[in-house]
Image (cartoon, grey):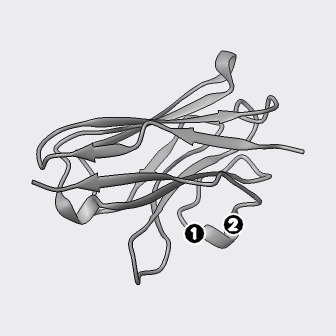
Amino acid sequence: QLQLVESGGGLVQPGESLRLSCAASVSAVPYNAIGWFRQAPGKEREGVSCIGINGITNYADSVKGRFTISRDSAKNTAYLQMDSLKPEDTGVYYCAVRSVSRCDLTAPAYNYWGQGTQVTVSS
């Protein structure tokens, strides 16, 4: 059973950076698409970024140019580098893996989810 564990969240000020990590318990990272999602209080979970097995990436318009997704197959780990953070980036961030190789930013497309890590951007 694939398990995902996110880390790297925290409290930062606007304009600062964080790097989130998503560690997989088995070697799913090289073979499947990985997504990052976030959920703010009272809002639906939204897709932030994804990366397919071919390395093609996709980003929500709200984070383009500020966030970068990557993967390290040797470490079974995916990352989300978040720069120039804004208060509206606040939320619980989840990583997810789907059973196919193509990137997708919709939550129902994913089969496995981590428990999330809190990101708070506030002055």
Q: Identify which residue is drawn at 20% across, 49% down.
A: 85
Marks 1 & 2, CB-CB < 8 Å contact: yes
- Residues packed near mark 1 inside 10 Å, few (<14), some (14 to 19) or many (20 plus): some
- Give the CA distance from mark 1 to mark 2: 6 Å
Which mark is on residue 106?
1
Quarter of the figure that contains the N terminus:
top right
Task: Provide residue 10's location: percent of width, then percent of height.
Answer: 34, 44
Q: What element carries label 1?
A: loop
- Residues packed near mark 2 inside 10 Å, few (<14), some (14 to 19) or many (20 plus): some
Q: Is residue 116 above or below residue 2?
A: below
- Relative to residue 82, is residue 94 drawn left or right? right
Which mark is on residue 98?
none
Quadrant hosting residue 61: bottom left
Q: Identify which residue is drawn at 80% across, 52% down.
A: 99
Using the rendered image of the protein, determine whether residue 62 is visible from the camera's viewpoint. Answer: no
Q: Identify which residue is drawn at 28% across, 59% down.
A: 89
> Which amino acid, mark 1?
Thr
Q: What element carries label 2?
A: helix
Task: Provide residue 31's location: percent of width, then percent of height.
Answer: 76, 35
Front residue of this view, candidates 116 and 49: 116
> Which amino acid, mark 2?
Ala
Which mark is on residue 109?
2
Front residue of this view, candidates 31 and 39: 39
- Relative to residue 71, is residue 62 drawn left or right? left
Quadrant hosting residue 4: top right
